[in-house]
Image: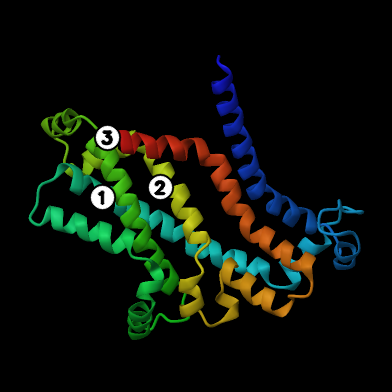
Amino acid sequence: MSIKKIVGAGSGYFVAIFLALLIVIPFVVMFMGTFREHTDIIRRGPFALPLEWSLENFRRVLFQYNFDLYYINSVLITAPAVIGSLIIALMAAFAFSVMEFPLKRLLLLATISLGVMVAEVFIMIPLFQLMNQLGLVDNLLSVILPSLAMSACFSTLVLRSFFMGLPRELLDSGLVDGASNWQVLWKIYAPIARPAIVTCGALTTVWTWNTYITPLVLIHDPAKAPLPLGLALFQGQYVADVPLIMTGAALTALPPILIYLLFQPRIVWGITQGTIK
């Protein structure tokens, strides 16, 4: 290997390590701060190790400041949004990939433009008006339904790409054997698309768990707030207590981080398979 290639590879590794440290260090400081007291952080700085490893901050934040309720609300929002979006996306992706019907391309374009390219902040006013007319303001359904719709659009595109790469003979053989389109979808296509389904499910879980704008506008009762909104309310009340703020942020960030770390190989594989095919 030439010196030029060695220098180039070393530079690449150095940049990668530097960028990784920029991302990891704030999380390490945050998690270390959850075990410390406010006076200790002020006296010894944010990068010092805890003098005593105590879970008192976690106990206080969870049970004294209603984060256990915020956790329940986030689960009640995330679970139906993820499951519902995957079911809808599987049916829509199957229809867009193997079935022929009028206005197919126009509907697919609408799915891309409205569900994926438009940020939720741009639809907050009409969304609030719609939910107000339906009587769903200050109801968890007002967060579940928009999250489900937008996630279903993204998942539809990923699953459609995956289905388009499957051989047409799978569909034809199933239909020849007497199976309906419904049976072909759930007994042949869905099991094969499991990696893509896991990819969509993991990404949708992270996005829905971290949603903030929609509950900020549509949820007024603090008892119904999910974790990101609950953290903002908590920070406004206890901004001076750094360890409590760090503990609340750690409790909010921990589930998405764990989900991504657990499913990261499947997420990358599922996206690349759907894209390549």
In which quadrant is the N terminus drawn? top right
Up-down relation of residue 143 to residue 201 (above or below):
below
Q: Quadrant of residue 161?
A: top left
Residue 186 visible here: no
Q: CA distance from mark 2 to mark 1?
A: 14 Å
Which residue is outermost to the top? Answer: 1
Tell me which residue sits at (26%, 61%) in the image.
Answer: 113
Front residue (pair 234, 66)? 234
Q: Say which of 177 and 102 sits in front.
A: 102
Question: Which image quadrant: the C terminus?
Answer: top left
Picture residue at 40% right of the left edge, 80% below the top = 136
Q: Position of residue 50 (x, y in %)?
A: 87, 53
What's the residue type where badge 2 is placed? Cys
| Sequence-first tag of 2 and 1 | 1
The mark found on residue 188 in the picture is: 3
Q: Could you say where residue 51 lies in the image, as x and y percent from the top left?
A: 92, 53
Residue 72 x/y as whole percent: 59, 65
Q: Which residue is mark 1?
A: 91
Few, some or many C-alpha atoms within 10 Å of disc 2 (few <14, some 14-19, many ≥20)? many
Residue 200 is marked as 2
